Image (spheres, grey):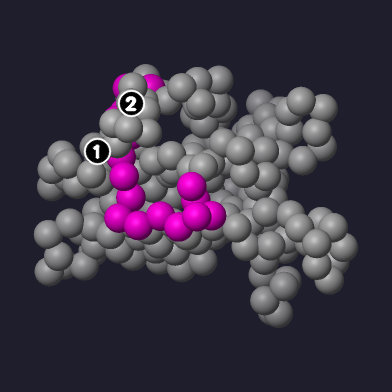
Amino acid sequence: MRPRSVLLALMGAGVASVLAAASGAPGAQPGGAPKAAASAATDAGARNATATDAGATDAGDELPLDAAPFPPEPSKQPTAVEWKAAPRVRLSRAGPAAAGCRAYRAREWLRIRCPELTVSAISLLGGKSEGVAFWIDPARGGSELPRGGEVMFPIRRGDRRVIQILTFGPGYDGPFTLLPAIVIQEQWLEDEPAPTVTAS
């Protein structure tokens, strides 16, 4: 399958998950990341109303990513209430493209939200799909384009994953060409004391 076909297939799965969640229809799908995205979409919908207010801290109060110890055993996905109280954390590195994004941590779970980015698709490019979930906000303010999206995943020792957020822009397919906007990379090697998470 050609790379372009793979990307379109991933987009189709993600859009189907979001539409299913929006309509209240069951969103579970067979497979890895799409199923995770669908299962989290309903929780994300409940969170979306308070997404811009999530976390009790502002940019000046960001904590280091590893300020609190990571639990030794896997835990369940945080609830909407837990995310509401989750502190804002600082990623290991963040480039200019991710300047408008905010990261929150609850136990070993990380949530990266980009509220002002026009998001066309989100895909897991590689690594563990367990616990990975995506959410693309519906269009608002009379716009036909969705603005805002988020990624959620657990950070556990031995993990490695790469997630790409795409936007729209001018290109070979016209003004709505899918273009890479942000690449999130997460890894925690066995011999490292803490994980590394970057967004650029």
Residue type beneath disc 2: Thr
Q: Is residue 70 left or right of residue 56?
A: left
Residue 47 location in percent, x, y? 49, 25
For marks 1 and 2, the one nearer the N-term is 2
User: Does residue 78 show up?
Assistant: no
Q: Which contiguous range is marked in magenta? A: 84-99
The residue that appears at 30% across and 55% down in the rendered structure is 92
Which residue shows up at 55% across the image and 20% down it?
49
Report the front residue among 139 and 160.
139
Q: Which residue is mark 1?
A: 63
Crowdedness near tag 2: few (<14), some (14–19) or many (≥20) residues, C-alpha within 10 Å = some
C-beta proximity under 8 Å, tags 1 and 2: yes
Q: Position of residue 73 (x, y in %)?
A: 16, 46
The residue under the point 61% across, 38% down is 116
Query: Which quarter shows the N terminus?
Result: bottom right
Vertical order, 51 against 15 (above or below): above
Q: Quadrant of residue 23?
A: top right
Q: Position of residue 21 (x, y in %)?
A: 63, 32
Say what secondary structure mark 1 lies in: strand
* Mark carried by residue 33: none
Residue 68 placement (x, y as % from top left): 15, 39
Q: Residue furthest right?
A: 174
- Quick check: 178 above or below 108? below
Residue at which label 2 appears? 57
Q: Secondary structure at mark 2?
A: loop
Image quarter for residue 152? top left
Q: Is 199 placed left or right of 137 in the picture?
A: left
Magenta span includes 91: yes
Magenta-span inclusion, residue 43: no
